[in-house]
Image: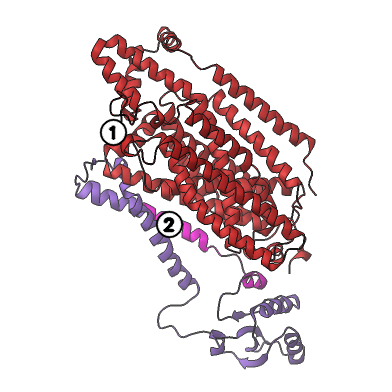
Amino acid sequence: MYTVSKRLKTFSLALIVIGLIGTVYSFMNTPKTIEDVKAMQSTHETHGASHEAVTTHQEKTTHMVPAPHETNMNHETATEDGHNVSHDAHAAHTLHQLKNRPWAAFYVALFFFLGVTLLVLAFYAIQRVAQAGWSIVLFRVMEAITANLLPASIIMFLMIVAAAMHIHHLFPWMAEGTVDPTSPNYDAIIDGKSWWLNIPGWAIRGTVYLIGWNLYRMYIRKHSIAQDNGGTLETHKKGFNISVMFLFFFMISETLMSWDWIMGLDPHWFSTLFGWYIFSSLMVSAITVIAFVTIYLRSKGHLPFVNDSHIHDLAKFMFGFSVFWTYLWFSQFMLIWYANMPEETTYFAMRFNEYKIPFLSMIVMNFIFPILVLMNSDYKGIPWFIVIAGIIILIGHYVDIFIMVMPATVGANWAFGIPEISALLFFLGIFIYTVFNAFAKAKPLATGNPFIKESEEYHYYNIEHREESASEHH
Amino acid sequence: MKSSKVIHAFYKDDEVLVKAVKKVRAANHHIEEVFTPFPVHGLDKALGLAPTRIAIASFLYGLTGLAFAIWMTNYMMIQDWPQNIGGKPSFSWFENMPAFVPIMFELTVFFAAHLMVITFYMRSRIWPFKKAENPDPRTTDDHFLMEIPFDGNETEITSLLEDTGAVEINIVEKH
């Protein structure tokens, strides 16, 4: 049985503490009042940045993503008092975005880790439903990774509660008066969508998704360990049936989750393939994470039964889902670009104008790099090669989530600094702590699975196993 | 002096065949050719054949297709007959590039797939109206055939082949 080394435990706890300190620091460091923002802007002015540029900059963002209350406020006040008041409105807008930033940074990392964990669970369920033979030796690794689902879900639940209580303002449709025709903040588009985008419905739905996923994870982990201790074929079939039901629930809840938690940040904009797009991004990250944890544990000698063919298969999935992500990303982009309808193009105009470097480099990291690096079959079985490709893929898909969330919440006031890094470290620490502790709690091999022999003997005919003696294979 | 006679050993199972190939080669016999009704995984390795280079050829064909698609879309849509489609500027290939991506993708796949198949046929020496090379029609049905040059020592080679699980052993004149 595997035991978590002291160093790894200390490392993960250190990550959590550093992340927490950084997050608290970035919350305390946000400007409190409009005066703070004005002071910041005037220091910028004295430092040589032209105030005019900042102003037009803000104006552009406001129009790109019409966060309802801000736009209306601009119109109202600008006509009354002219420049001075509109200046206040810009400062208020900037203040709103700067206040959002630590929340948004935290939310990006939370969504990334929750999504990756969830997709590992879905991939695991797919293996059971497909009755796959090759992957059984990786079952305990996948089960361990899904242990991160519970803490991530709890934090997500707290985020949902915080949003519903107006503690943070990441979702512009939740603002005061958006569905009240008498309010200056009234937004007809949001009002039209209010049968779906309303706080009680949104919060209940989010809670239902989280409970559903966690119930399956709890059940299937128990089931898998019960199989080790003398399960029958009947037990196995029951696990199969539950997994089928979970996948049905997952595909629906994943799509709705992507609308509720990501697309709702831009409530005027919509895309019909958004659920699949999120799915592909999280799926390729999830498989990369499985490969990473597997390679790490194998290098420490805890997974002697995992051979190069298993690694090769994970790399094939990394390659395939990278191409799948590109297909969906491009399908979404091209239709919007070609049709050129203002209500749709705002999404990409914002990202292309204010997020050009992450936007373009993400496509290179998520498409061109994996396709060139992972195309050759010989390289897919080499662990260090997969680690390099995987790091780029994970960064690329983090950036993908980043530019889904940030433009809608902080607009042009984005940066990659202490809030973003701290949030990442915090969730990475939780991930490492829960995953390796969960791995230590069960046998490293799911010996009760009826396909275990097939998995152990799995050999992709086209490659040689490098770390094995010749006698082990015929 | 070497005779032009060859031994045809028949097998009924692909796994038995692969094991037999390894055994025969281990006994220092040269295997001229193996005929199978379907591709057998691992047979090329057992026979000691060099790894295929068709993947590299396919990659290059794909690049050719990509280059052709870029040239073609540029010639048709920008140079020869520029049109205003959906208000998109038709004077720059690069600014119109997203519209051409499906064409680039399709021609990459088209070139890679077709040229790869043609290359495979050429390298395997098969083309329309060619007379089949396989010595026994049963190799297109349920038999596997191993062809070994006959060196004159009949008892030794037949006992070796029988050991490996051959169901039929014939010594025939090669034409």
Q: Colour of chain A?
A: red
SS for tag 2? helix
Nearest the viewer among A435 and B5 is A435
SS for tag 1? helix
Query: In the rendered image of this protein, does residue A68 appear above or below residue A95?
Result: below
Q: Mark 2 points at which residue?
A: B62
Q: Do the residues labelled 2 and 1 touch (CB within 8 Å)?
A: no
Q: Residue at x 66, y 34 (%)?
A: A429
Residue A386 lies, in percent from the top left, at 61, 47
Disc 2: CA contacts within 10 A as few (<14), some (14-19) or many (>=20): many
Query: Could you tell whether A158 is left or right of A42 in the image?
Result: right
The amino acid type, in three-letter code, at marker 1 is Ala
The amino acid type, in three-letter code, at marker 2 is Gly
Q: Mark 1 lies on which chain?
A: A
Q: Residue at x 66, y 44 (%)?
A: A147
Q: Name the residue under label 1.
A: A188
Q: Colour of chain B?
A: purple
Residue A129 lies, in percent from the top left, at 58, 61
Check if residue B45 falls in the magenta segment.
yes
Residue B34 lies, in percent from the top left, at 61, 80
Check if residue B81 falls in the magenta segment.
no
Give, as a single range, the part of the protein colored magenta: B42-67
Query: In the rendered image of this protein, does residue A167 appear above or below residue A40?
Result: below
Query: Could you tell whether A132 is left or right of A176 in the image?
Result: right
Residue A177 lies, in percent from the top left, at 35, 27
